[in-house]
Amino acid sequence: MTDLDHPDGVYRVVGTDDGTVTLLRVADADGQRVNSGEIVTVRSDELAECPEAKNPDGNRPLGEKVTSNLMMTFWSLRAFAQQLVVHPIPSVLAVALVAIGVVGEEFVQLPSAAQSALILGGSLGLAYIGSGRL
């Protein structure tokens, strides 16, 4: 922003109204990401005078990106497992379908199409239960 009322930095549009635009400050003047929570409202014509900025998320170090992705994977798997624990009967049934499909040939004579259908059905059941939609 070039206005003296607002600190220099990178702002993202988070809302619009009749003639005004609400902005959230997401980076400082050097382009480094900040989590200030600072919200600014400006007139739409003032916004047209401001230069467009590049995405401030693009300058995160590789280590932070990898750590963030690993943490997101951990929390996603944890939430998935919690949903399976919350719904034990459907979860056990879905796991049983997959297990029968995988080892069913050794104990019960199942056609390969039936085995594939059991594996697919059980896997889709686990995905549905783990997604929290049950």
Image (cartoon, rainbow, N blue to C red):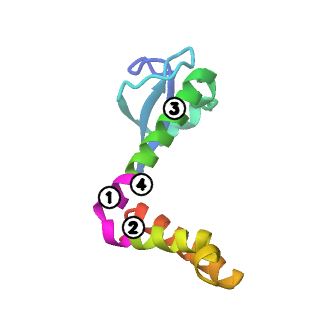
Q: Which residue is mark 1?
A: 85
Secondary element type, mark 1: helix
Task: Between residue 89 and residue 124, name the one nearer to us.
Answer: 89
Task: Residue lying at the far top in this picture: please name it.
Answer: 30
Q: Which residue is mark 2?
A: 91
Q: Which residues are magenta?
A: 80-91
Secondary element type, mark 4: helix
Q: Residue at x 55, y 24 (%)?
A: 64
Tell me whether circle 1 and circle 2 mark residues in contact (CB < 8 Å).
yes
| Sequence-first disc among 3 and 4 | 3
- Give me the disc on residue 132: none
Tell me whether circle 2 and circle 3 mark residues in contact (CB < 8 Å).
no
Of the two numbered discs 4 and 1 in the rendering, the one whose residue sits closer to the viewer? 1
Within-10-Å neighbours for mark 4: few <14, some 14–19, many 20+ = some
Q: Amino acid at mark 4?
A: Phe
Task: Between residue 127 and residue 25, name the one nearer to us.
Answer: 127
Whole-number angstrom distance, CA of label 2 to CA of label 3: 29 Å
Of the two numbered discs 3 and 4 in the rendering, the one whose residue sits closer to the viewer? 4
Q: Quadrant of residue 34?
A: top left
| 78 left or right, relative to 120 | left
- Name the spot of residue 39 as percent of width and height, x first: 36, 32
Q: Which residue is mark 3?
A: 68
| Sequence-first disc among 1 and 2 | 1
